[in-house]
Image (cartoon, rainbow, N blue to C red):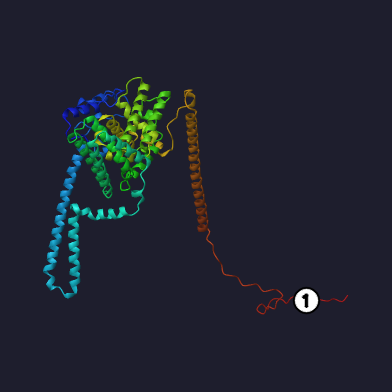
């Protein structure tokens, strides 16, 4: 956060630095009042990604950089708005508590007035109701008083006594190294250095007892601590401004190295869920090409290809850092490599309209791990003055814009039809790749093999789709044939119904004695003739 005692001249200087974030490349940036949007309209023939640079600034018009996590405000304006909303919420909670207490007291008084008419069998019930009423009123009062956390603190003290590995584990090698460096650095400040060290130790102890607070409340504690120490360095200890900035960097490094495991992607937030959503989204957009984003970078140039690789390495390396300032340094190095790649490709200084599309392409190509968690961690616990002005603030704001663009990217953003966009997103097809005959001889063999494998996979995908289609057609034909045969059999049965006739009497043997048929001649007897 900018110091409250900063003069207007310093603010003008910060704004000037805001509009000149890169020393090696000329950025055509301008405040909102200059009419930058009119300039972009003159280049309407270019189908690129354009963001008015005034949209990167605080929407309250203070001249500092805003942040999507702060609803477009800078750190200073956001805290002012946050405190106003918090005070309003506290006032509403007080009014609600008082109203509930009055209702409880009225209900209790009403029940007491009719107590004489009740039978003795209800005495225990009334006593229980009275105790419950007292408990509710006490609970409401404690909830809105400073002593409401007494129980939680007692629980924390009991928990701290238990052998929890997250609290009692040995300090890591990096933590020990940072602590030694911090102590050596404070020796150069003599008396102020001792006070700074005491303030930092007190802050760390306070944060250890505030684990039950939300991450937003812990962030506010850290921001208050930064502001208080910076003001004391300037007013009480009369430290020069350049030494104040160095001291604040070392203080941030010391306390955040120790607090990192507790405040980075905590389980009480949905940071991990956002990380997985962004990672899944970037994987689904693997087919996006530089041409679709109008990226002015030619990766066939070896120097440009090296710059792109370095930019991707830097943005991925951000996750390995523990200090917010070090994470910002990775973003700054990545951005400078992007500017160099654009400058080599175009053979002229890069512009802001070229930077943002290229940054989006780098993020899509690199798919940095835990991207949202890192952005939230920087937003919550970085020294806010670093996010409001200078190179780090400019590049970080652009990274937030790039992530927001990726989350909302659609067919219109890429100048595609909705049908093509849906087919690319579902993996039914991929944009046409470059033919191998037109490749430069300097292209890596691995890249060529990758494109050949992608073409082979595309062909296999088409064959599989045809097989599935034919299988479905065969299944339908079998079902239709079965239904047709069953219908024919049913028609025949209905046309020629089966009739069962009664059983006929059995015929008598001709040689048997048939009493009923006595009119029949007797059976022939053999006759003997004399010869």
Identify the image quadrant of residue 190. Answer: top left
Helix, strand or loop status at disc 1:
loop
In the image, 242 versus 25, the foreground residue is 242
Residue 322 place in picture, x, y as percent: 34, 39
Q: Quadrant of the C terminus?
A: bottom right
Left or right: residue 143 versus residue 413 is: left
Q: Residue furthest top?
A: 347
Q: Position of residue 142 (x, y in %)?
A: 19, 55
- At x 19%, y 74%, the residue is 121
The image quadrant of residue 71 is top left
Residue 16, compared with residue 268, is above or below; it is above
Q: Report the label total.
A: 1
* 280, above or below 443, in the image: below
Camera-side residue of 72 and 515: 72
Q: Residues within 10 Å of mark 1 (few under 14, many from 20)?
A: few
Residue tagged 1 = 525
Front one among 96 and 12: 12
Position of 45 relative to 527 (above/below) = above
In the rendered image, is residue 473 in sight?
Answer: yes
Q: Position of residue 323 (x, y in %)?
A: 32, 38
What x and y, as percent, mark residue 433? Answer: 45, 29
Viewer-nearest residue: 410 or 198: 198
Q: Residue at x 47, y 31 (%)?
A: 451
């Amino acid at each position: 956060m900018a110091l409250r005692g900063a003069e207007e001249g310093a603010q003008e200087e910060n704004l000037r630095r805001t509009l000149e974030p890169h020393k090696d490349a000329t950025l055509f940036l301008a405040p909102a009042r200059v009419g930058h949007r009119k300039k972009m309209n003159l280049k309407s023939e270019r189908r690129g990604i354009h963001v008015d640079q005034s949209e990167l600034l605080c929407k309250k018009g203070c001249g500092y950089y805003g942040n999507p996590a702060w609803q477009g405000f800078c750190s200073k304006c956001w805290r002012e708005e946050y405190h106003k909303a918090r005070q309003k919420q506290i006032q509403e909670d007080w009014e609600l508590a008082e109203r509930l207490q009055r209702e409880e007291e009225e209900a209790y008084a009403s029940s007491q007035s009719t107590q004489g008419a009740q039978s003795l069998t209800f005495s225990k019930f009334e006593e229980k109701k009275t105790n419950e009423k007292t408990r509710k009123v006490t609970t409401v009062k404690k909830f809105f008083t400073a002593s409401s956390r007494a129980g939680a603190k007692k629980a924390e003290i009991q928990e701290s006594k238990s052998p929890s590995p997250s609290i009692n584990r040995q300090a890591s090698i990096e933590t020990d190294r940072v602590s030694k460096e911090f102590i050596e650095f404070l020796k150069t400040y003599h008396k102020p250095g001792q006070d700074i060290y005491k303030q930092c130790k007190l802050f760390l102890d306070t944060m250890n007892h505030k684990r039950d607070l939300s991450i937003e409340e812990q962030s506010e504690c850290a921001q208050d601590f930064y502001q208080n120490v910076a003001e004391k360095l300037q007013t009480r200890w009369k430290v020069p401004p350049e030494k104040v900035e160095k001291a604040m960097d070392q203080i941030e490094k010391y306390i955040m190295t120790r607090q990192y495991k507790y405040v980075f992607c905590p389980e009480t937030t949905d940071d991990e869920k956002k990380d997985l959503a962004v990672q899944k989204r970037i994987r689904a957009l693997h087919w996006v090409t530089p041409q679709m984003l109008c990226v002015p970078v030619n990766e066939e140039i070896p120097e440009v290809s090296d710059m792109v690789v370095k930019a991707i390495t830097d943005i991925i390396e951000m996750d390995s850092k523990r200090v917010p300032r070090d994470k910002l340094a990775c973003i700054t190095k990545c951005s400078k490599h992007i500017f160099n790649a654009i400058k080599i490709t175009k053979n002229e200084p890069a512009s802001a309209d070229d930077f943002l599309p290229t940054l989006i392409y780098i993020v899509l190509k690199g798919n940095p791990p835990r991207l949202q968690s890192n952005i939230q961690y920087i937003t919550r616990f970085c020294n806010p003055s670093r996010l409001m002005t200078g190179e780090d603030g400019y590049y970080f704001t652009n990274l937030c814009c790039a992530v927001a663009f990726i989350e909302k990217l659609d067919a219109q953003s890429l100048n595609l039809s909705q049908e093509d966009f849906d087919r690319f997103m579902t993996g039914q097809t991929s944009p046409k790749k470059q033919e191998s005959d037109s490749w430069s001889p300097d292209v890596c063999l691995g890249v060529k093999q990758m494109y050949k494998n992608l073409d082979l996979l595309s062909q296999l995908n088409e064959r599989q789709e045809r097989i599935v289609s034919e299988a479905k057609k065969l299944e339908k034909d079998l079902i239709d044939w079965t239904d047709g045969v069953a219908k024919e059999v049913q028609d025949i049965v209905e046309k020629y119904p089966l009739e069962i006739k009664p059983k006929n009497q059995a015929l008598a043997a001709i040689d048997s004695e048939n009493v009923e048929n006595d009119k029949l001649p007797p059976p022939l007897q053999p006759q003997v003739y004399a010869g």
